[in-house]
Amino acid sequence: MPGQDWLAAHRNEAAADRILDAAERLYTERDQASIGMNEIARAAGCSRATLYRYFENREALRTAYVHRETHRLGREIIARTGAIESPQERLVESILVTLRMVRENPALASWFATSRPPVAGELAEQSDVIAALAAAFLHSLGSDDNAAVVERRARWVVRVIVSLLMYPAHDDNDERAMIEEFVVPIIAPASARR
């Protein structure tokens, strides 16, 4: 319609991303629970009113940040593991890639420090975005189980990943062995080949 700002949605998305980028910088410096909305507004270069226009509170901002990063990680995991044909090996590699990417990102890694409240685990458990992406991934492995079973298994895989992020195994080989021994037989058994 004439007179409407056809760039408004793009500007809104860019502004929200700028705020989330500022929050991410702060998350690398300190415990996310200690960072207030005033600090995030200052870091983003906006007023508190602008910040609250996009995020009604700190929990909404944290959730938006986690969802944005979940989508980013999901795209990268697919790019790194999508060509692996074996469902079992794709499952193992996808979990290992997820662990490496989270651990290599200072902002995300800080959410899983055992010295802090388990906010990351709570967000992961409650996030519809994380659950949907995990379930979609499990469906892509060729499971013919019903949706409720796949969704339950997806929630369990998320818990396994959170557990390994908070309490890493001795080394990469140990994590791989645990995933192959305890996760693959439940999620992608050899009998469930495509």
Image (spheres, helix red, strand yellow):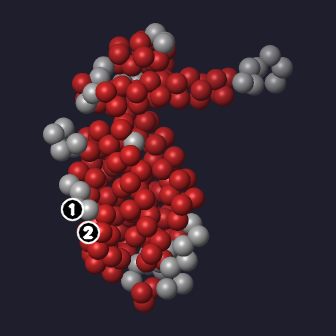
Mark 1: amino acid = His
- Judged left or right of residue 75, residue 11 is right
Disc 1 to disc 2: CB gap under 8 Å? yes
What amino acid type should be assigned to the residue bearing mark 2?
Answer: Asp
- What residue appears at the point 51 percent right and 48 percent down from the top-left corner? 71
Instruction: Tell me: residue 117, above or below residue 49.
Output: below
Residue drawn at 46 percent across, 43 percent down: 69
- Percent of width and height locating residue 166: 23, 51
Q: Quadrant of the C terminus?
A: bottom right
143 lies left or right of 79:
left
Q: Which residue is mark 2?
A: 174
* SS for callout 1: loop
Estimate how packed mark 1 is, as few (under 14), some (14 to 19) or many (20 or more) residues with alpha carbons within 10 Å: few
From the viewer's perspective, tell me whether residue 82 is left or right of residue 159: right
Q: Residue at position x 28%, y 53% from top?
A: 165
Cα–Cα gap, marks 1 and 2? 6 Å
Identity of the residue drawn at 42% across and 50% down: 101
Question: Looking at the image, which is closer to me, 78 or 103?
Answer: 103
Q: Quadrant of residue 32?
A: top left
**For this rendering, which residue is in front, 153 or 111?**
111
Residue 37 visible within the image: yes
Residue at the disc numbered 1: 170
Residue 51 coordinates in the image, percent (x, y): 45, 18
Point out residue 97 in the picture as x, y percentages from the top left corner.
43, 59
